[in-house]
Each structure stands twice: as structure tokens, then as C-alpha cells.
């Protein structure tokens, strides 16, 4: 019978392997013929060959048979069978049995005394699903990787460095967003329900999306318009190299109305932008006609406190496990409030409207508690009513009455994948009014705001992204021309404004530090260095900086290749000769 056994083994392949294993199993004792160890080795060899032919199901059966013929030495064969079966199930998308198989794997490893690293890499399997665009396969695999980590130890992070929990949450958000955009909100809600307990998340509720104006029109709030809608001009962008064919889309030139609105009995989430009232989500960005292009990010950043997805006029928002309660407040907290550029453009202008008499003077100004002191200094500077400033921790907050004001323009956090970058245009009137108020208040406090003709270069050495990698070379080239290096993050807000306002020429990377050029004197000339990316928000920087009357010139350098970051945040270098040529160009255009 040994000849029959060898014949069956040698003739077995991916197409007839099932029949071959059936034949062996049906007559196993006779085929083994008293030589169990040899038979087990042959079966293990067959299993290895079937694995190479991508018949993992048959390979697992062969390992199981090897374990059956050698009970005394079955442990390593049984372990191999379980490992192979886990791989087979995961690659076929048959995830349900794997949880039990992982329990079996733990027991089999103990029985075999196995301490090696041969267990299936569920993280790599999940990554393969993710790269293939199969979000559900990736989620199921990451969930199993999480269980394997808890049972067996091993890898705690994904291939791209996220925690398993964060990856699962983000993939679920992508899936739910797609469903919500199709109007399938109940399905998105059910999808979240399947994994929320694993991640420690609350259930989702469905809300209708409305703007502040629409919400107040129903009689459940007050809306005071302080500056009506108006048309703004598209900025003229200047590049040292001449005209550049941009790949972004010009932002809307219809500036939205500016207002103060008040609503009762609201639920809010610090670090995020939404306001919930009853079954409505009050959010101008999500209610805007252009919201379909916006990749709204509430609930994605690590320090945010809820999950929210948007689509087809409705949103799903996670119910908080606990809340803090406040009588009243003015909403100066929200997404990216810690980032200086976002803070100065999206949040600070609201102080113009919070100072209006339509806004009760006893309402405290509520900010996120993770913001740096310089942010608070700006609030204190602009507040004309002596209000309390109340930092809020990252916990949902219920307000008996909440005052809100808008962002000066439609400004999505990012455009959706596959949609051209939306390059927001900032209205000159609002930013100029903010600039004027800041300068007036600083002057009243004795800050010296005289124009001195200083020439400064803004250092970005302390930042990891969008670095000018040859910054030292640029500084050395500009030093003979009277330039001094300034590190804005080391200065108070009044010190920053005074330096920017005094300078006649400013050179810096197009980044948050350059945002302070809003406070330049109108005779100033600015060189903004940036990488090659043509979808960058050139219109945004131009409209924002030139609201001061200053003039801006872009110099595009060379992007540093090979970095796995958003194209906007890539590092780059600029030839010093280009900067010197840009300086000559500015001098010729100086008043």
C-alpha cells in the first residue's frame, strides 16, 4: 500500500487535491502501513506544495491528516493546519470562523511549545485589503488583528503607523460617508453599530443639516446679520517665474453674510465645529451648496471627542457617554483651533461680531483648552466687553444658550478625494477690519507700530512638515542684504504684530507664520517660498496677505521626493539665486 500512498501524493495538485486527500482519508490506516512518521512527513510536504499553489484549504487538510497519523507528534502539524486555515479564511473573506481559530491557535501554540513568529500577519492581510480598496475586508482583518494582539501578543500598530483601533474607526468613517452620500443613513448607522462596542464608541443618531440662518428662521433661535452677502474680487497671483497653470479650483467669490446667532439647549463638541439642537445639526459648512466637495473632518483627529459623517443633507453624530453643562457661552472652539493659521483666519474674525451689542455681554468666550497662550492673548486683545474666557476640555458640552458666528468664507478643511483642491478666497473687508482692530488695540496699549524698514526672514526650522530644507543657505544669502532671522513661535502675539508691521520686506515659507502678514504695513513686500505643488492654496494666501495692502510674490522651489505626506506639506528647497532675484523684483516694484 505504500506504493499507492506515494502515487496519490505525487499526483495530487491544486485541481485534484481534494479527491486525493479524500482517498487518503478513506483508507488512512492501510496507506500509512505502520510508518506514521514517514507518512506525516509526506503529507506535510504535500501541504507545503499546495500552499505554493494557493490551495490553502487543501494544505490545511493535509496538515490535519499529518497530525492524525502521528498522535504523539501531532502538535506542530496541528499548529501548521490552524495557521494555514486562518490565512485561507482571511484571504477568501470568510472572517467569521477566524475568531474561533485564533483561540485554537493559542492552545496549539501552547501544546507545541511554540514561541516563534510564524503566525499569520493579520495586519499585513488587512493592509492588502486596504490597498485593494476593500474597506470592509480591511476592517474585518484589523478587528481580527486586534483580537490576535490581545490573545497572542504581537504587532500593535498598522503598516502606516496607526493604532489598530484608530485604523478601524477611520475606515468605518470612510464607509459611512459613502453610504451617507447615497442617502443610506440607516445603513451607515447599522454599520457603526457592528463595531462601536469594540472601539468604545457611542451609538450614532441621524440629524438634518441646517445653516445658522435656517435654524433661526424656524423660531428656535435668534439671527442678527451684521454684514450682508457681497461679491469679492479674485486675487491676482504673482509668481517669480511668470504665470503658472494651477490645478486647484478658485474658491467662491460670493462672500457669505456675517452674523451673530443664538440658540438654546445645544449640544457641542470641543475640537469640532458642529452644534446639535433637537434633531438638527447647525453647521454652515455642511449646509453650504458647495459642501459636496468638502472632506469634513469632524471626529478624525486624535484629540477630537466624537464621530460624525455627512451626506445628502443629513449627518450621523455619535452620542456622547458624558457631557459637561454650561449656562451660556460664545463658540470660539472648533476643528484645528490649535493651528495658528486656522485660528487667525477662521476663529479670530468672529470676535468682531461677538463684540456687537446683539451679543450678550455676560456670555463667556469658550475656547479649546489645548490652544497655546498666544491664541488666548488675541482673544483678550480683541474682547471689548471684559468677558470671561473659558477653556473647554475635550468632552461634549451642553449649553442652555450658545452664541455662534461664522467663518469669513466657505473654507472646507480639504476637498474630497478625486475633486480638485478648493482654493478658498478670503474677503478683504473682514480681514482688514480684524487687522484694523488688532492694530488699534495694540496702539492703545503702547505697542510701537512704526514702520522701520526692517527686513526679516521667517524661520521654519522647528517644524517637521513643509520644511525649507536649505533654510540656512537662504539665510546666509540674505544676510548681506540686511535681513535678520525671526522665530515667530518664540514671540508673544503683540511682539509678532509689531515686527511684521515694522518690516518692509518679509521672506518666509508659505505656512502659518506667513499668515501674520495680515498685519503688515501697506507698503510691505513679501516673498513666499513654497514647493512645486500647483494645487497649493495660492489664491488663499494672496487674498489673505494682500488684505493688508502689502504685495506678495511666490517663488516655487523643488519638492523633496519620496515623502509619504500630503502634497501640501512636502519639504522643499529653493535656490538662493531665485530668492535674490525675487528681492530685486520687489525692489523695482516698491513704492
Image (spheres, helix red, strand yellow):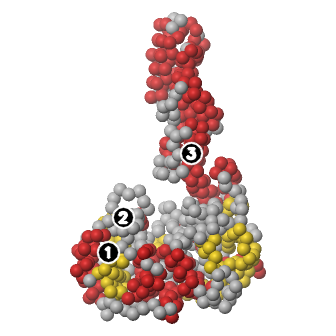
Check disc 3 and report the residue beneath it: 142
Q: Residues within 10 Å of mark 3 (few under 14, many from 20)?
A: many
Secondary structure under the numbered disc 1 in the rendered image: strand
- The answer to whether residue 464 shows anywhere in this view is yes
Q: Residue at x 74, y 80 (%)?
A: 221
Distance between the alpha carbons at the discs numbered 2 and 3: 32 Å
> In what element is the residue under mark 2?
loop
Which of marks 2 and 1 precedes in the sequence?
1
3 and 1 marks in contact (CB < 8 Å)? no
Image disc number at residue 540? none
Disc 1 to disc 2, C-alpha distance: 14 Å
CB under 8 Å between callouts 1 and 2? no
Q: Circle 1 is placed at which residue position?
A: 555
* Rendering quarter of residue 19: top right
State the residue position of label 2: 571
Q: Going by the image, does 298 lie left or right of 534?
A: right
Q: Eyeballing the image, is 286 above or below 348? A: above
Query: In x, y percent, where is residue 583?
Result: 27, 82
Instruction: Classify residue 467 by image quadrant.
Output: bottom left
In depth, the one of 134 and 449 nearer the eye is 449
Name the residue nearer the viewer: 564 or 91: 564
Residue 186 left/right relative to 151? right
x and y, in percent, of residue 223 in the image: 69, 84
Residue 174: give x, y in percent of width and height: 58, 56
Report the residue at 37% width, 70% height from top.
460
Q: Dot 3 lies on which element? A: helix
In percent of width and height, residue 473 lies at: 26, 70
Residue at x-position 60% and y-position 89%: 384
**Of callouts 2 and 3, the N-terminal one:** 3
Amino acid at each position: 500500500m505504500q506504493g499507492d500512498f506515494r502515487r496519490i501524493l505525487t499526483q495530487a495538485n491544486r485541481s485534484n487535491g481534494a479527491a486525493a486527500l479524500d482517498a487518503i482519508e478513506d483508507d488512512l490506516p492501510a496507506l500509512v502501513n505502520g510508518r506514521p512518521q514517514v507518512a506525516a512527513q509526506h503529507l506535510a510536504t504535500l501541504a507545503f506544495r499546495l500552499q505554493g499553489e494557493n490551495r490553502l484549504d487543501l494544505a490545511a487538510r493535509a496538515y490535519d491528516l499529518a497530525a492524525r497519523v502521528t498522535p504523539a507528534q501531532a502538535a506542530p502539524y496541528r499548529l501548521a493546519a490552524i495557521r494555514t486555515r486562518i490565512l485561507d479564511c482571511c484571504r477568501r473573506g470568510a472572517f467569521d470562523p477566524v475568531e474561533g481559530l485564533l483561540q485554537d491557535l493559542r492552545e496549539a501554540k501552547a501544546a507545541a511549545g511554540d514561541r516563534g513568529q510564524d503566525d499569520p500577519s493579520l495586519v499585513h492581510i488587512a493592509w492588502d485589503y486596504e490597498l485593494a480598496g476593500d474597506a470592509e475586508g480591511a476592517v474585518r482583518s484589523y478587528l481580527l488583528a486586534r483580537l490576535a494582539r490581545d490573545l497572542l501578543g504581537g504587532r500593535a500598530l498598522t503598516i502606516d503607523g496607526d493604532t489598530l483601533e484608530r485604523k478601524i474607526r477611520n475606515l468605518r468613517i470612510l464607509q459611512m460617508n459613502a453610504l451617507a452620500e447615497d442617502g443610506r443613513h440607516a445603513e451607515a448607522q447599522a454599520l457603526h453599530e457592528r463595531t462601536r462596542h469594540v472601539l468604545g464608541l457611542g451609538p450614532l443618531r441621524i440629524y438634518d443639516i441646517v445653516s445658522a440662518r435656517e435654524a433661526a428662521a424656524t423660531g428656535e433661535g435668534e439671527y442678527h446679520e451684521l454684514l450682508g452677502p457681497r461679491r469679492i474680487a479674485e486675487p491676482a497671483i504673482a509668481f517669480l517665474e511668470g504665470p503658472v497653470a494651477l490645478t486647484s479650483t478658485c474658491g467662491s467669490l460670493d462672500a457669505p453674510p456675517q452674523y451673530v446667532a443664538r440658540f438654546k439647549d445645544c449640544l457641542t463638541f470641543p475640537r469640532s465645529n458642529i452644534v446639535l439642537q433637537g434633531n438638527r445639526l447647525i453647521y454652515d459648512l455642511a449646509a453650504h451648496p458647495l459642501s459636496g466637495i468638502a472632506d469634513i473632518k469632524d471626529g478624525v483627529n486624535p484629540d477630537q471627542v466624537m464621530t460624525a459623517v455627512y451626506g445628502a443633507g443629513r449627518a450621523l453624530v455619535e452620542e456622547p457617554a458624558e457631557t459637561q453643562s454650561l449656562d451660556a457661552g460664545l463658540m470660539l472652539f472648533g476643528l484645528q483651533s490649535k493651528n495658528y493659521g486656522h485660528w487667525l483666519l477662521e476663529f479670530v474674525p468672529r470676535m468682531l461680531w461677538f463684540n456687537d451689542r446683539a451679543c450678550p455681554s455676560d456670555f463667556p468666550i469658550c475656547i479649546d483648552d489645548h490652544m497655546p497662550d498666544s491664541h488666548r492673548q488675541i482673544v483678550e486683545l480683541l474682547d471689548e466687553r471684559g468677558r470671561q474666557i473659558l477653556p473647554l476640555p475635550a468632552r461634549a458640552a451642553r449649553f442652555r444658550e450658545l452664541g455662534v458666528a461664522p467663518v469669513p468664507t466657505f473654507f472646507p478643511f480639504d476637498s474630497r478625494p478625486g475633486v480638485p483642491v478648493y482654493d478658498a478666497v478670503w474677503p478683504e473687508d473682514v480681514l482688514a477690519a480684524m487687522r484694523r482692530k488688532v492694530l488699534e488695540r495694540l496702539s492703545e496699549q503702547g505697542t510701537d507700530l512704526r514702520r522701520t524698514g526692517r527686513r526679516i526672514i521667517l524661520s521654519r526650522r522647528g517644524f517637521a512638515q513643509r520644511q525649507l530644507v536649505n533654510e540656512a543657505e537662504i539665510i546666509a544669502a540674505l544676510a548681506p542684504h540686511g535681513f535678520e532671522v525671526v522665530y515667530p513661535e518664540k514671540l508673544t502675539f503683540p511682539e509678532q504684530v509689531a515686527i511684521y508691521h515694522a518690516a518692509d520686506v518679509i521672506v518666509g515659507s508659505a505656512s502659518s507664520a506667513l499668515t501674520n502678514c495680515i498685519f503688515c504695513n501697506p507698503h510691505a513686500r513679501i516673498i513666499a517660498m513654497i514647493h512645486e505643488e500647483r494645487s497649493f492654496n495660492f489664491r488663499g494666501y494672496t487674498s489673505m496677505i494682500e488684505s493688508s495692502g502689502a504685495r506678495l510674490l511666490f517663488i516655487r522651489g523643488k519638492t523633496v521626493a519620496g515623502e509619504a505626506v500630503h502634497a501640501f506639506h512636502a519639504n522643499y528647497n529653493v535656490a538662493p539665486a531665485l530668492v535674490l532675484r525675487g528681492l530685486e523684483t520687489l525692489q523695482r516694484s516698491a513704492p
